[in-house]
Structures are given as structure tokens and as C-alpha cells.
Image (spheres, rainbow, N blue to C red):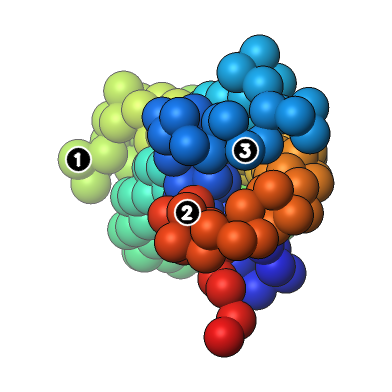
Amino acid sequence: MNTSKMNAEEILFQSGLRINNSKSDPKVLNAVSPFGYTAEKFNEGTTLLADATTLYETQKQEYGEVDAAQANYESQRTEAHDDYMTMLAICKIAFKKDVKAISTLDLSGRRATTLSGWLKQTRGFYRAILANEEWKAALAGFGQTEEKLQAQLANVEGVATASETKKREMGDAQNATQQRDEKLEELSEWVNDYEVIARIALADKPQLLEKLGIVVKN
């Protein structure tokens, strides 16, 4: 079984053919048992196959959670950034003659694109406003209440949390991939060893080898 050209699904399928069809066919069992592949020996293969299948499914689930975490992060960041840009536009009007506000709130600077830069910029923006009664009063005149500012700052913090969740899920998925691959390698080694024995034991029964998914060259 040349696993170098197989994906995980194919390895599991081909391994299942060899193990399950050998166990269920008395002719195969009678032929390979003298070579050490008894029903008890096949239980080892069955366990490896079950474990590999479970780890394969777990790995898929973990990457599903990565995708969900990524989508949540992107949604939260988009919403928080849109709110920030709207508030920024209002501040440019409210504080157009306030040099201190223009400088402190970075009203005329560039918007950061990296997450770390964006978090620093947005956190500084909201926290500075919330700490300044005069600025809060000015923004209230444009319908921007302290409650709204607090809510938007909370959304910024939500982006940071979503980012950490995404990183954690990615780590879990990578770990699941490693565990899956290690078990698939163990399973493949077991099946490849068995395949050598099956070819010897069933050399005169090519139809049984075909039943196990083992290609017989004419």
C-alpha cells in the first residue's frame, strides 16, 4: 500500500479493506493464520483503524472550529473597525479646532493595519475620550453617548479575545493533525507488513488478494 500518494481518507479506506475483509473471510484467515495473522492479531489492526478514524474525525472537527473562530474574528473586527471609523469621522468635526484632541486621538494620522497596531490605536482613542469629560460632552452633542463609547471599546476588546481564540483553535488543530498523522503512520506500517504476508499466503488465490484491495499484476 503506497501511502505516499494517498490522503488520509484513502489510507483509512484501503486499510479498512485489508483488515475488515480479512477478518470476515474464513478462507483468508485460514491462509494467513499460519503466518501469525490470527483473529487476535487482526484485533490490533482493528484497534489501530478505529483510533486513526477517531483522530481523523477529531482533526476535521478542530479545523471546523478554526474556520468558525476565523469567521467570528473577521466579523467582530469589521464591526468594531466600522464603528471606530464612524466615531473618528465625528471626532474630526467635533474637535477640528482642538489641537490637543487632534494629536491625542490621532485624528489626522494613518490607520494601523496590523492587529497589534489597530488594537493600540483604537484602545488609545476610546480610553482617551472616556477619560476626558470635555471631550465626552462635545461628542454627546453629536449623539455619541458615553454608553456608546464604552460599548465600542468593549467591542475592540472583543476583537482581541476573538484573536486569541482563533490562535488557540489553530494550535489545537495543528496538534490534532500531528496526532492523526502519527496514528495513520502506525496504521500504515501495520497494514503494509500484513500486505507482504497476505501476498505470500494468498499467492495462488489472486481473487482473494483483490478482495483485500491488493492489486495483483498479471
Alpha carbon of mark 2 to alpha carbon of mark 1: how far? Answer: 80 Å
Q: Earlier in the sequence, mark 2 or mark 1?
A: 1
Amino acid carrying label 3: it is Ala
Q: Secondary structure at mark 3?
A: helix
Q: Nearer the viewer, mark 1 or mark 3?
A: 3
Along the viewing direction, whichever of 71 and 177 lies nearer the viewer:
177
Residue at (38% x, 49% y) in the render = 71
Q: Which residue is mark 2?
A: 208
Q: Position of residue 174 (x, y in %)?
A: 70, 43
Is the C terminus in the top left, top right, bottom left or bottom right quadrant? bottom right
* Label 3 close to label 2 by CB (< 8 Å): yes
Is the N terminus in the top left, top right, bottom left or bottom right quadrant? bottom right
Along the viewing direction, whichever of 187 and 39 lies nearer the viewer:
39
Q: Earlier in the sequence, mark 3 or mark 2?
A: 3
Q: Which residue is mark 1?
A: 143
Amino acid carrying label 1: it is Gly
Q: Position of residue 116 (x, y in %)?
A: 71, 51
Along the viewing direction, whichever of 79 and 50 lies nearer the viewer:
50
Amino acid carrying label 2: it is Leu
Q: Position of residue 51 (x, y in %)?
A: 60, 25
Q: Which residue is mark 3?
A: 31
Q: Nearer the viewer, mark 2 or mark 1?
A: 2
Alpha carbon of mark 1 to alpha carbon of mark 3: how far? Answer: 85 Å
- Seen as rendered, the residue at the extreme front is 204
Q: Does residue 92 appear to the left or right of 174 in the view shown?
A: left
Residue at (53% x, 58% y) in the render = 205
Where 216 sits versus 128, above or below? below
Where 197 sits versus 48, above or below? below
